[in-house]
Amino acid sequence: MMSASPGWRPALDTASRPQARIERLCRDATDPAALLAELGPMISDACEADAFVFSRLDPLTALWLDVADAGHASDSCDAYRRVFLRSPFADFAHAARQPERVVTVTRGEVARDPYTATYLDGYGFAQELHASYAHGGQGFGQLTLSRRQGPFAPAAARLLENSVAAITQALRRLTARETLEAIPGEHVALLMVDADGHLRAANAGGAALLEAERQAIGEASGVRMLGIVAELAARSLRAGTPLDLPPAMYVEPQSRQRYRLVTERLLDSVAAGVVLLIAEPVRALDSVALLRGTGLTEREAEVTVMTLRGLRSAEGADALAMSEHTYLSHLKAVYRKLGVSSRGELAALLLAGM
């Protein structure tokens, strides 16, 4: 019988232990922010990274919902807002649509752009690993690991590749649960942002949202959804271009109230050069866009909307130009994903705020 070399078993154990821990944490996770806070340092240490940023994303817009990070300079949040969407390496929606789930970014081997100039050149990182946790073209999370000296070991990329499925599944599950369990917001919140990204005014609801974010995530608040939307609004004002941002689902981190976040550029003479951020209370999850945020596919969301409107299976199938058998298959998948067993339970869950 052939014996293994002395170094074989420790190498296997070293590779398998982080993977098993990742899968266990993902399986048992009940809080998305806590999962990021535990997984981020663990994966970073296993891969011998000097810094990491681990983000959970809104699947509708690929904007930040939760962020855990360590090892970066204190001004890196402000720097990231400035380079966001100005490079494929800082565009999570772009990453979610790519076939590769893990990408290596090496100083001197990639084209110089705002992201690489800032993080590889400016902050002195030699190499980064970017992992995108996506499904069906929707981004649910993004992890960036950074090293200052030399490349990552091949085992680091393998660990990220092997853990993509478990982490993606956990983030999808937790995001859907958060949306479904959140309660409707009570008031419309308004925030007014100028071309410098400064807050010009806010009503009581808007001020409360900002304070809740600051208390929940401290310095990382600038790269959560409100901060990054404010940056994009300021950019559009400086460039004189429309702010093309789809409505986003936003759950306030303290009260767990849910809102639809939309933007509107004000053009009147009094408030010219200002973008209004509007957080509208979401009382019912009754549109395709909102249902997509719970982890349903587009077809499943369409079937759900038809069902909530009270259409029978045959009527809904005709409206969506599909067979009744296909319609019922999608509806069965919706029941399984949302944890209900009847149309009545489905309506009670999704229309609870009406």
Image: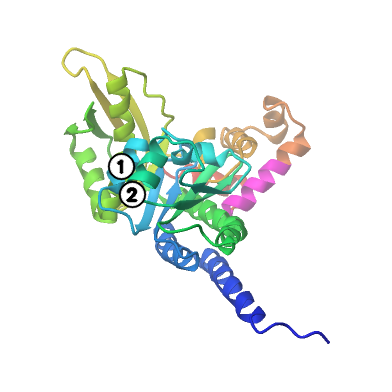
Q: Quadrant of the C terminus?
A: top left
Q: Please tell me whether residue 288 belongs to the stretch shown in magenta.
A: no
Q: 10 Å neighbourhood of mark 1: few (<14), some, or many (≥20)?
A: some
Residues in magenta? 329-339
**Image check: 267 left or right of 159?**
left
Q: Which residue lies furthest to the right in this view?
A: 1
Judge by depth and name the residue closer to the eye, 333 or 175.
175
Say which amino acid is labelled 2: Tyr
Q: In which quarter of the image is the N terminus?
A: bottom right
Q: In which quarter of the image is residue 288?
A: top right
Q: Main secondary structure of the magenta part?
A: helix
In this picture, is 232 found above or below 68? above
Whether residue 207 is visible = yes
Tag 1 secondary structure: helix
- Residue at numbered disc 1: 79
In this picture, is 161 found above or below 267? below
Q: Where is residue 164 in the image (x, y as percent from the top left)?
A: 58, 55
Q: Position of residue 243 (x, y in %)?
A: 37, 24
